[in-house]
Amino acid sequence: MYAKTWSNLEELARQIKAVNPNTHVWHYRNMQLRLTRNEFDCPKMYDPSYAGYFLHNKDGSYLNSTADFPWANTTCESFPNATYSSNTMQYYLDWRNESARNWWLDVHIGSIINSSVVDGFYWDDPVFGNEGMWIRDQYTPEELADIDSNMQATRLEAYNRLSRGGGFCTGSTCPTSIPDVADCTCTSPHSNCTCDYSPEAVTQNIITSQSKSGNPVLMHVPYPFEFHRVDGGPYNVTCSGPAVVQWQPDPASNPPNLPHPVQLSCLPGSGTMTVDFASFGLPTIGRGVPVLPGRGVRQADCSVFAANSSCDAGDTVLQQLKALCDGKQSCRFNTSHPIFTRPSSGCGDLPVSALQLAVRASGCQFGTGSGVVLHFREQLAMFLLARGDHWWMGNDWIAAYPPVFLPEWDVDYGIPISNLTIVGGVLSRQWSKMEIRLDANTFEATFNSS
């Protein structure tokens, strides 16, 4: 979220939180630069007592540039060097100056930590001079290394302060990352992935993550890929229990998308499931109003699920899914399974790609499945198995997309009361309200209430 001044940001954040308390609001800052649109900082650029805070050109003038951001339409026009009429005037902080570093940490990071409505910080650009390489010509390699090393040290200190204060960092310069629970290669960040789910890969990734438990971490969960699909992606199903609507792609026109894994999941701690409806063909799914890709999701209502007797693969679909899923917290199946073939009659000339699978279960609360985020449940288990004191799990930079808050992020797991243990390929950790387990042999996560 952006605003011209800190006070405006606070007010904007309050308005956003009033509409949706689960919306995260963060403050943006390109760390290399001091944005002079902030009315509290603007005078400092021309106050002699702050002259040492900012970098200068070889001729002694301030080293500055402009950022052509779409939301930036003002400058410090009342100050002598503000010669640009429509862009944001920027000055480069001299990170070698201890007073400047402390000012940035105490005032700017402190204002976020002390805010009751702003949750975190978005940082951009990991290397000094990343934007506008011409500024590097002003300094020797040794000077650049000194500026950059001090900037990096300040960034890490800011990140640690922010984490200790209950805030989080998102963006390209958050210092600590951890691997995915499986080793995946994807044609996009959200789909068409080839993954190594071997016990060795899964175990090693969790061990690697656990070794960083002393660091602040943002465990990045890819933004649900239906917002990025040309066709709008899978359906968002309105249901109290696990449910999914999935389609079978046409292998002739869409071969990279085969096969399509589907996962039904219970919300952790809410019980196990019993499949009570499954149909492949042209089932009734309670279609909602279509929405544009990138601005919403297609809707389905499981309360009106019904088989279409004229185009349906029959009871074998239900029996297969009951065998796979009944009595479990989660289950996976694949739409390339032979039971998901085009019914022999009743569907006219429709290709397989026009057919859909609709599944509904009862017995537990709806949990996020792989129709929304690839192996989210296993990522969640990994996060809780390895989590340190200052870890966050959520979406990274989502730009103009609507906010998404997954229900698992509202579950109370308690606090960890034991360390990660590994026995026979099963990784486990006891939390005060739930035991977390991930069987690396079967890639199955379980969350058992204490």
Image: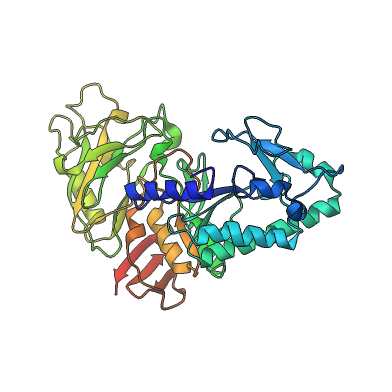
Pick the quarter of the image with the C terminus. Answer: bottom left
Q: 251 above or below 440?
A: above
Q: Decide if residue 132 is on the left or right side of residue 142.
A: left
Residue 283 picture quarter: top left
Q: Residue at 24% x, 63% y: name it.
A: 270
Task: Give the camera-side residue of 385 and 2.
Answer: 2
**Nearest to the observer: residue 222 or residue 116:** 116
In the picture, measured across the screen, residue 406 lies left or right of residue 75, that is: left
Q: Residue at the location (39% across, 41% down)?
A: 402
Q: Nearer the viewer, residue 121 or 10?
A: 10
Q: In this view of the protein, can residue 204 be seen by the observer? A: no
Position of 414 with respect to 214 (left or right) is left
The percent position of residue 317, horizontal first and vertical second, equals: 21, 44
Q: Residue 358: percent from the left, percent from the top?
A: 23, 41
Can residue 356 be seen?
Answer: yes
Q: Quadrant of residue 408?
A: bottom left
User: Seen from this angle, which residue lies furthest front?
Assistant: 78
Q: Position of residue 197 (x, y in %)?
A: 46, 56
Name above or below for residue 287 compared with residue 412: above
In-image side of 332 versus 308 (left or right): right
Where residue 118 appears, as percent x and y from the top left, is 46, 54
Above or below, 338 relative to 93: above
